[in-house]
Image (cartoon, helix red, strand yellow):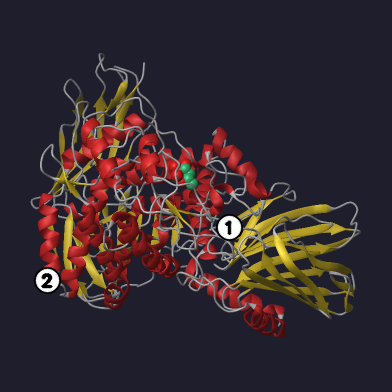
Amino acid sequence: MVPASADDPVSATPAHERELPPHRLWYEEPATSWEDEGLPIGNGHLGGVVFGTVDVERVQFNEKTLWTGGPAPGRDYTNGNWTSPRPDALADARRLIEENGEVEPEAIAELLGQSKTGYGSYSTFGELRLDVGDVGAVDDYVRDLDIDDGVASVAYTADGVRYTREFFASYPDGVLVARLSADEPGALSVDVSQTIPDGRSNTEVTVDGARLTVAGNLDDNGLRFESQVHVTADGGTVGAGEEAVMVENADAVTIVLGAGTDYSDEYPEYRGDDPHERVTDVVDAAADSSYQQLRDAHVADHRDLFDRVALDIGQELPGIPTDQLLDGYASGTLEAPHARYLETLYTQYGRYLLVASSRPGSLPANLQGVWAEGTSNPWSADYHVNINLQMNYWPAEVMNLAETAGPLHEFIDALRAPGRVSAGEMFDASGWVVHNETNPYGYTGVHDWPTAFWFPEANGWLSRHLWEHYLFTQDDEFLADTAYPIMKGASEFWLDFLVEDPRDGTLVVSPSYSPEHGPYTAGAAMSQQVVWDLLTTTTAAAEELDVDEEFRATLRETLDQLDPGLRIGSWGQLQEWKEDIDDPGDRHRHVSHLYALHPGNQIAPETTPEYAEAAEVSLNARGDGGTGWSKAWKINFWARLLDGDRAHTMLREQLTGSTLPNLWDTHPPFQIDGNFGGTAGVGEMLVQSHVGVIDVLPALPSAWAGGSVDGLRARGGFTVGASWRAGMPTEVRLSSDESGEVSLRSEMFTAPVRVYRENGRPVEHSTDGDVLTFATSAGANYRIVPQVRVDIERPDDARRPGSSVPVSVELSAPDRRAVPATGASVEVPDGWSAEPESVRMRAVPPRGSATAEFTVNVPDDAADATHPLSVEVRADEWTIRVPVPVEVHR
Ligand code: FUC
């Protein structure tokens, strides 16, 4: 063994060295159901769902701004604001609540609600149809979605010819692309056309040579739309047919599709330029590029985002199609590495879907991302802001896709103009407001569904996303120009809207409604927590920017008087309402009063253990059921409670009961929020940074005992990676965008570690318990390496009373430092014994190891249970304690 000198260069290559199995969804049959089986592609503004049907390929497609509703000739669109003044409505609602404590939702809806007018719906653009004629019998059919490259494909053999189709949506070129090829020259003939859904007028279909153009207006609001399809053939002929472009006897065919509308996000007109020129330009440019050029540019762009996070939990490629994999997972028949494959595929699929449905230059991802099959879709495929839109963006920062949040920020910004009118006209308040759900036409007022119309706190919850973006990116310009003005406007609303609670003199929200159940009251937990969070982060932002001193003082005074929404009730629960009225039998899918635990950070086991415990009581009472997004939220909650196994249980629940064969989340119906919430939840299991410390592997489930992850982001401008074995890190990796101090938390730091720069130089650090702190330089990479490691070997099957368990302890020095002499023992519960009681272990040289053997005796009267044993290895300066639970079973 060669003792290394302090400044030996060490490899900067991450420990993540295994080539990961490809991330791919695949099937042996064409899709028959859009919702269950279609495979989604997208570039943020265009989305396509590929069926893989053989004779006539169907690619249903969307353009993000194709929405009915909003301003329209002959419609009195009020953005949901009251059509006539109701000067007393708010005061009446408040009085009802003050007098009765609890008020039926219908009574409040009667006073404050109003039926929806001009809300509209997201709509399909149509279907691209590729008609290759009657193919006859087909062999070796496969349909897949390669999410590493962002390419869907279909392949089959007919008449001895192998046919292949590829589909992708290119962000750099702004088009959907389809490519048909065959392994025999001249084998391809296809008619390319487009369907036109209902609800369109002035529709013109023109075929000019190789170009099919469809343009018209939506009946509902006159929105102008246009799509153009251009067909290029290698070999063969291309000609104009009636409403189709016809290709005969080609070797290969490339089809590009561009689409747009005259929507603009500018209040109050919401109209911009006719899309004709824009669509013509992108389709012309794409038609001038070769298929390979389009594909290469797309794959490079996609991988630039997608490849940033690598997750290895020991998954292995299963040799079965994805629908069978999902079935096997649900029935518990998969081998563990195949189950882990599905878990990593699902995690990365959420990242794929976010890249595909949210890129700068268009609207944010809606309830179905960018994919919607009908002209009037479930919940309009809109922007619900009492959880759903927010959940869509939970993975954006931690999962290293911060750019995808741009459309959300712009959308929130565009809500301000109509939101100011709603605040002023309806409530005589300044600032801006939005309620339970909204559309792209600034619907910031109300509707009248009693249990789901009132949620003015949405302005605060949305604002949190801007502040988080700043925390993760440290982008000062973004904070000053985008985030702060929006946060300030939302805070101004609350400064005017909060009222004093006669019960205790605190400031509360009234009316207040905990989504989407129970009575209307004053000061429900979520209302208070969201407002507390908004005012607190707005104060922090103003301080950071050193602006608005007087306003800051007002915020602080208000915060001092604000009810923070945290109360522990009679059965130990975190109260959902200000009065202790929680029903332990309540299984409602919204768990709103835990906002403070996630996505907020008012509650954390490290900082407010008693509230964290109460949150756990509430969460246990709510149970592990729920709809898709509800389960996804529970993954995040349990991760924040640092319970990796329970978070994993919820991930299993989501995959088992709320995931369709194409891995889309189902409420039911298909709703994409759960996909994003699930992916974010895995992020929370692996790294957390919401209480000022980067917690590494805070909620690692025992099913993921070994693995590695790279590319996760943490607040403060950090990128984090780690490798682990037996649940304990073997290395932590950190890159720092800025110079400053960083603190990380891991059980690993309770024993000696060293921190190295990429050039191999050790970095000075300090530790305090399980927290390690050191100074970072901008752009530098660090590795944190344990200097001592304890591995345990023992049979892990259940033992009988009166039997014994051999326990072998391996102590090693994995880096360049020796481990000094230590004492080792097994700590056992009362009535148990271990032989020997303790062992003295000699010093271990660098990269060497030593072992000690113990026998644990299980007492005759040991109960059927898992008993908490542990191994302790003690040196003068440190102690390592490794839990070794022993299950006893008669
Ligand atoms: C919220 C949820 C519903 C549904 C809708 C789109 O209102 O409570 O379950 O997800 O959004």
Q: Is residue 454 left or right of residue 554?
A: right
Residue located farthest toward the left when viewing the structure as drawn: 876
* Image disc number at residue 549: 2
Disc on the earlier residue, 1 or 2? 1
Which amino acid is tagged 1? Tyr
* Residue matched to label 1: 122
Q: Position of residue 354 (x, y in %)?
A: 50, 61
- Residue 250 drawn at (x, y percent): 87, 75
The percent coordinates of residue 108 (x first, y second) are 35, 39
Q: Residues within 10 Å of mark 2 (few under 14, many from 20)?
A: few
Name the spot of residue 422 as percent of width and height, x first.
Answer: 36, 59
Q: Quadrant of residue 443?
A: bottom left
User: What is the distance, in whole Å, between disc 1 and disc 2 at their CAs?
Assistant: 43 Å
As rendered, which of 15 and 555 lies closer to the eye? Answer: 555
Residue behind label 2 places its C-beta within 8 angstroms of ligand 1: no
Q: Amino acid at mark 2?
A: Glu
